[in-house]
């Protein structure tokens, strides 16, 4: 009888072990229909079920903190390196190693200590009225603070993480003092008080409210490819410019959507396999089709609409600096009067 009970116990433990190895629990701040197709394909290829909980980045970070050692979450997916930094500061991530990922994801898009990786790239560039801005193809971020752009610039508010990360990248490349001088000049050139999202800035350029706006590339791409006729018309009147493309220039500012493995992950091995899958060429197409982002894996093909934007040079800043410099970036924006 004792032998039978021990055998049943062993079988039960084996079943529980196998069960835990056949799932990965994902907390995601990305909300695109194509992401579910991505998860379904991963399950089809590996047999590992993806259990998904969606929410805002800060909400999910706080949820993981509250769950503590009992958290079932294996992976946090979010947008912007600044939010990955918030997860890092909350001490909810753990480091991991994968030679496969290191081959596919350039080092500037990986945390130096292996806490997270980039999954897709987002260019925060300039949207211009080509008829109103002379030599617009040669624009730099720094140009927007010059007197010639007085009353001609639109941008969303300073509480937006994309703007904070742009400032943080400038702190890293040109220093805090020069960045604050630039931010002050930029504020002086606002055509209106910051308002709305990136698409609102693009619409404002098309409507003649301003001649140039700061925006992420995919907002314009979505306006071009979407079904809204008014947005398509607005998009047809503007052009996307990759700033700082000269031979001696640093290149366009790049941000990421990214993911990390959580500190108390119950399925770490599956979590690593999941992240490895997300960096494959097959998986990268879902990031491309879902939101017209640039693939983190340079071997993956980019969307047709992005091909029309042309090639670009990106800055070499490790995106971990965007989070590390975030507090200083916010202080600079406050002192500059960027509301």
Image (cartoon, rainbow, N blue to C red):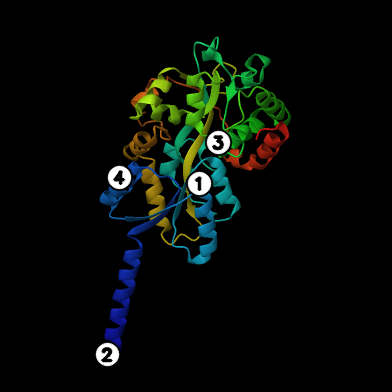
Circles 3 and 2: CB atoms closer than 8 Å = no
Disc 3 secondary structure class = helix
- Give the residue at mark 4: 37
What distance separates the C-alpha of mark 1 from that of mark 2?
Answer: 50 Å
- Give the residue at mark 3: 162
Mark positioned earlier in the residue sequence (1 or 4): 4
The label on residue 171 is none
* Quadrant assignment for the N terminus: bottom left
Q: Residue furthest bottom?
A: 1
Mark 1 vs mark 2: in front:
1
Q: Mark 4, residues whose alpha carbon is within 10 Å: few (<14), some, or many (≥20)?
A: few
Circles 2 and 4: CB atoms closer than 8 Å = no
Rendered position, 76 above or below 304:
below
Q: Mark 2, residues whose alpha carbon is within 10 Å: few (<14), some, or many (≥20)?
A: few
- Give the residue at mark 1: 116
- The residue drawn where x is 37% and y is 50% is 273
* Quadrant assignment for the C terminus: top right
- Give the residue at mark 2: 1
What distance separates the C-alpha of mark 4 from that of mark 3?
Answer: 27 Å
Circles 4 and 3: CB atoms closer than 8 Å = no
Mark 3 vs mark 1: in front:
3
Query: Does any portion of residue 317 appear in the rendered image?
Result: yes
Q: Quadrant of residue 327?
A: top right
């Amino acid at each position: 009888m004792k032998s039978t009970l021990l055998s049943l116990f062993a079988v039960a433990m084996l079943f529980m072990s196998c069960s835990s190895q056949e799932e990965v629990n994902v907390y995601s701040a990305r909300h695109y229909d194509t992401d579910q197709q991505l998860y379904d394909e991963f399950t089809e290829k590996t047999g590992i079920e993806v259990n998904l909980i969606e929410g805002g980045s800060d909400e999910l970070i706080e949820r993981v903190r509250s769950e503590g050692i009992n958290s079932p979450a294996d992976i946090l997916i979010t947008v912007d390196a600044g939010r990955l930094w918030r997860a890092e500061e909350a001490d909810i991530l753990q480091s991991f190693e994968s030679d496969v990922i290191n081959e596919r994801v350039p080092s500037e898009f990986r945390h130096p200590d292996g806490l997270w990786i980039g999954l897709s790239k987002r260019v925060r560039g300039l949207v211009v009225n080509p008829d109103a801005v002379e030599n617009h193809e040669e624009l730099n971020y720094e140009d927007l603070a010059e007197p010639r752009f007085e009353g001609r610039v639109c941008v969303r508010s300073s509480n937006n993480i994309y703007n904070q990360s742009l400032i943080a990248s400038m702190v890293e490349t040109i220093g805090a003092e020069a960045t604050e001088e630039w931010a002050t000049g930029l504020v002086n050139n606002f055509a209106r008080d910051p308002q709305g999202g990136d698409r609102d800035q693009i619409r404002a350029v098309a409507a003649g409210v301003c001649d140039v706006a700061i925006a992420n590339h995919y907002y314009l791409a979505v306006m071009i490819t979407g079904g809204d006729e008014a947005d398509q018309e607005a998009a047809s009147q503007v052009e996307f410019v990759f700033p700082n493309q000269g031979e001696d220039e640093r290149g366009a500012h790049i941000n990421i959507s990214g993911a990390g493995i959580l500190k108390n992950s119950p399925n770490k091995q599956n979590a690593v396999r999941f992240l490895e899958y997300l960096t494959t060429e097959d998986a990268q197409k879902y990031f491309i089709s879902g939101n017209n982002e640039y693939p983190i894996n340079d071997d993956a093909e980019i969307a047709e609409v992005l091909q029309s934007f042309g090639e670009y040079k990106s800055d070499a800043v490790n995106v971990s600096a965007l989070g590390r410099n975030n507090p200083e970036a916010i202080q600079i924006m406050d002192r500059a009067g960027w509301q």
